[in-house]
Amino acid sequence: MECWEVRNIFRKYYCRGGKKALECLGLKLLHKVCNFVFFVPVMLIPVKSKRMTVCVEDDEELRVDCLIEPKPNKINTYQFSWSIGPRQETINTNVSGESANNLFKDKSRVEELEPVGYRMTLSDFRDKLSDNTTFLCKISGQGENITLQKDNILSCSAVSLLLKNSWSWMVYLLLFFYHTHS
């Protein structure tokens, strides 16, 4: 049911039926909350990649998950890199003929994720990041990238993942309104 439908139903059956003005004011508030809940979250949803995530683990290692589904009947290859300005550096790869930058050889590892994708973990990375760093991953030739600011890389903990999900904030907001208006 759309917000305008909620408003029209309340106007037609509730406020015009001789109810007190205060009760009708409460219904108008409900309509405003309805508009807020349905329209404001659209503005709050951050732009992010669905197939790639970057975060910092509790042990201060950088984690890059690349969730690209490889093409069937092909040998899976992966390549993780980052771009700082015009310079792109390969962090870890199993692509034939490619090699990782010497800075990352002993500091990164890659593991396969189930059901699809790969996870690259990088230690000792903070001093190598610029203010804006673009992380790139390729699996079997299909690529994805995400650009992040150095100070805005979030923690991988469950609490941080909950806080960055705008839907969780809407639940708290609805509970707040329910509690204060019941």
Image: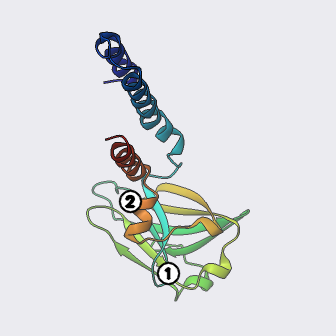
Instruction: Choose between 101 and 111: the one closer to the eye.
Output: 111
Q: Residue at x 32, y 12 (%)?
A: 18
Instruction: Choose between 182 and 155: the one closer to the eye.
Output: 182
152 horizontally vs 1: left or right: right
Picture coordinates of residue 22, whole percent (x, y): 41, 25
Q: Residues within 10 Å of mark 1 (few under 14, many from 20)?
A: many
Instruction: Choose between 139 and 38: the one closer to the eye.
Output: 38
Is residue 95 shown above or below 144? below
Three-letter amino acid code of the residue under disc 1 = Glu
Three-letter amino acid code of the residue under disc 2 = Leu
Is residue 156 shown above or below 108? above
Question: Which tag, 2 or 1, sits closer to the chain's start?
Answer: 1
Picture coordinates of residue 24, whole percent (x, y): 39, 22
Q: Residue at x 36, y 20 (%)?
A: 20
Q: What is the secondary structure assignment of the residue under circle 2?
A: loop
Check disc 1 and report the residue beneath it: 61
Q: Quadrant of residue 140?
A: bottom left
142 horizontally vs 103: left or right: left
Disc sitting over residue 67 in the figure: 2
